[in-house]
């Protein structure tokens, strides 16, 4: 494990040593680990409390039920179907079924190519 060396004035060094004894720790590094972990947890708690405050101030409350999540999933599916037609989705599903893993850039290139092809064919059908 990497180390960090710190210099402390004598009164602080004595304080740290007394805390190590009081807490039943073996080494002063354990004391500092505890302090840092406590600070990290405090920052995480502050972050989430801020998110809760933002949520409370974002507007009137809504009831979140399983139906709420189902409705969101339906909206996402509808949007994906609007953006990516069935043929495109089938090609992606086929790649997944065949365990054909492709880089993300290639995935989006294929999606864009398929979408352009479908748009062009729709334009030709409309003409």
Image: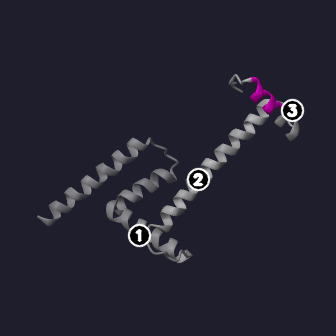
x and y percentages locating residue 7 in the rendered image:
70, 22
Q: How is the image coloured?
A: one colour
Q: Which badge, 1 or 3, comes first in the chain's sequence?
A: 3
How many numbered callouts? 3
Distance from disc 1 to disc 3, alpha carbons, whole Å, reads 56 Å
Secondary structure beneath disc 2? helix
Residue drawn at x 20%, y 62% is 122
Q: Few, some or many C-alpha atoms within 10 Å of disc 3 (few <14, some 14-19, many ≥20)?
A: few
Residue highlighted by disc 1: 75
Q: Tell me, for residue 99, which label it has, or none.
A: none
Mark 2, residue position? 46
Q: CA distance from mark 2 to mark 3?
A: 31 Å
Q: Which mark is residue 26?
A: 3
Compare residues 124 and 70 and report the one nearer the observer.
70
- Residue 114, above or below 103: below
Depth order, front residue of 87/26: 26
Q: Quadrant of the C terminus?
A: bottom left
Q: Residues within 10 Å of mark 1 (few under 14, many from 20)?
A: few
Q: CA distance from mark 1 to mark 2?
A: 32 Å
> Dividing the picture into quarters, in which one does residue 83 lie?
bottom left
Q: Nearer the viewer, mark 1 or mark 2?
A: 2
By secondary structure, the bulk of the magenta-drawn segment is best described as helix
In front of the other: 1 or 91? 1
Q: Image quadrant for the N terminus?
A: top right
2 lies left or right of 80:
right
- Nearer the observer, 37 or 20: 20
- Check contact, mark 2 vs mark 3: CB within 8 A: no
Magenta run includes residue 89: no
Identify the residue at horizontal 43%, vertical 43% (top origin).
Answer: 104
Question: In the rendered structure, which segment of residues is drawn in magenta?
Answer: 10-17
């Amino acid at each position: 494990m990497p180390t960090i060396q710190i210099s402390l004035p004598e009164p602080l060094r004595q304080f740290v040593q007394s805390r190590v004894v009081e807490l039943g720790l073996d080494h002063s590094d354990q004391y500092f680990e505890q302090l840092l972990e406590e600070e990290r947890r405090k920052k995480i708690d502050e972050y989430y409390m801020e998110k809760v405050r933002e949520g409370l101030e974002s507007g009137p409350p809504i009831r979140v039920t399983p139906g709420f999540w189902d409705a969101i999933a339906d909206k996402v599916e509808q949007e994906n179907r609007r953006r990516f037609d069935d043929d495109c989705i089938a090609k992606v599903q086929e790649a997944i079924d065949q365990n054909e893993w492709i880089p993300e850039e290639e995935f989006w290139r294929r999606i864009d190519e398929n979408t352009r092809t479908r748009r062009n064919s729709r334009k030709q059908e409309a003409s």
